[in-house]
Image (cartoon, rainbow, N blue to C red):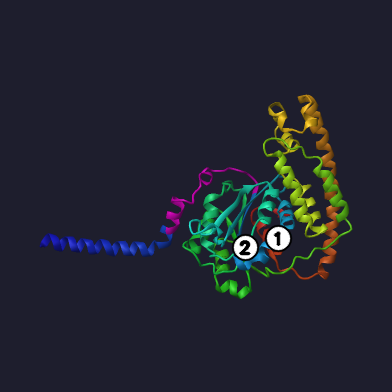
Amino acid sequence: MKNRNLFAILAIVFLAFSYNYLVTEKWESQIANFIDTAHFSAAAMTPVYKKNTIQVALLLDTSGSMSGLIEQAKSQLWQILNTLANTEKENEETKLEIALYQYGSPTYGKRSNQIRQLSGFTTDMDLISKKLFALKTSGGEEYCGEVITTSISELNWGKDDSNFKMIYIAGNEPFTQGPINYTQACQLAKKQDITINTIFCGSYQEGIQTMWKQGAQLADGEYMNINHNQTTVYIETPYDKRINELNQKLNETYIPYGTEGKIKKENQTKQDFNANSYSSANAASRASFKSSKKYKADSWDLVDAYEKDKEIIKNIQVESLSDSLQTLSKKELEVKIKLIRGQRSSIQNEIQELNSKRLIHIEKNSKESVEENNLKKSIENSVRKQAKKNGYKVKN
């Protein structure tokens, strides 16, 4: 009997201790379990020591009411990327990487909690554009804490202090929804020097009441609200036509190579078309980005690849090149690449010069247009504020 009583007492003590532990450690346990199981990718576990890299993860709500948000992301992408392309460190070259997630779409079912990585960190902005234009909205559950934690664990975030790391999450449901507590998710980001900027699609006060502001504050970010249904207004300039003509010439300087060369070249043309489908002014914004150092095509363009590594000429599979180039010797091919590289630089410089005039024209005439309260404006304003804190500066 004594043994039974002792066993009962020990059992009660154990249960009481376990309950207290589970309550006090509830959210920490959820985060740890989340990371230890299916969501921590092998890539994310490999330390990355990139320097002077701007890394931006865009987490977009694609539930049924967010069609306006996705439309703004597509129509304002190149203006946003130009702001990031102009974010630099003094006397140091910087690199730009973008990642893209959607959340709140039931298409991907309960197993993924309606979260999907569309692209990990990439310098291929044509790919980001392609993924954006393929997005569709449908009703679902929006789990902010979980999509933030997923992006932190899956993506290859840089470890060097010189990096500028940001998450932008946009949506319109309470920030508190889902199995992962948002406070723990935001604190996890802060531990890794990742700033979280929250963009609520609705009234400023409602965003505060639904914890979007607190989410940003926990990770040293900006809380913003937007009218996600506001139509993008483009300011046409006298320089757009010439810039777009030069863009066509710029495209002719790309030499596709490798297994993906042809496909990537076709996608470059497709994303030109998508940008122009909004307006010639938007196409000019894309052309401006393509003329910057942040537009990278070395994975499929032989000219950029040669600039990155001169040894590629020795190892190139000539069968992957166009018929006219396959007959050239390695020496002749190298001469050809250098010639085209010079032509491209000349075109890019002219586009940049015209774009400087274009931006002045836009600045002078923007006061007469509708006041912007959209995705682009929110990201631009927050980047300018946070760049200084991270040792960067936005030109223009």
Give residue 288's position: percent from left, percent from top.
79, 51
Label 2: how many residues lie within 10 Å, few (<14), some (14-19) or many (20+)?
many
Magenta span contains residue 392: no
Q: Quadrant of residue 314?
A: top right
Q: Which residues are magenta?
A: 30-53
Question: From the viewer's perspective, is 47 left or right of 327?
Answer: left
* Mark 1 vs 2, N-terminal side: 2
Q: Residue at x 69, y 62 (%)?
A: 71
Residue 364 location (% of width, % of height): 85, 64
Callout 2 amino acid: Thr
Camera-side residue: 157 or 271? 271
Which residue occupies the foreground of this view, 106 or 88? 106
Quick one: SS at disc 2? loop
- Residue 221 falls in image quadrant: bottom right
Q: Can residue 42 be found in the magenta stretch?
A: yes
Q: Which residue position is annotated with label 2? A: 137
66 lies above or below 306 = below
Q: Position of residue 109 (x, y in %)?
A: 51, 58
Residue 377 image position (x, y, % from top left): 71, 64
Pick the quarter of the image with the N terminus.
bottom left
Q: Amino acid at mark 1?
A: Glu
Q: Is any part of residue 166 visible from this angle? A: yes
Point out the frontmost of discs 1 and 2. Answer: 2
Report which residue position mark 1 lands on.
Answer: 380
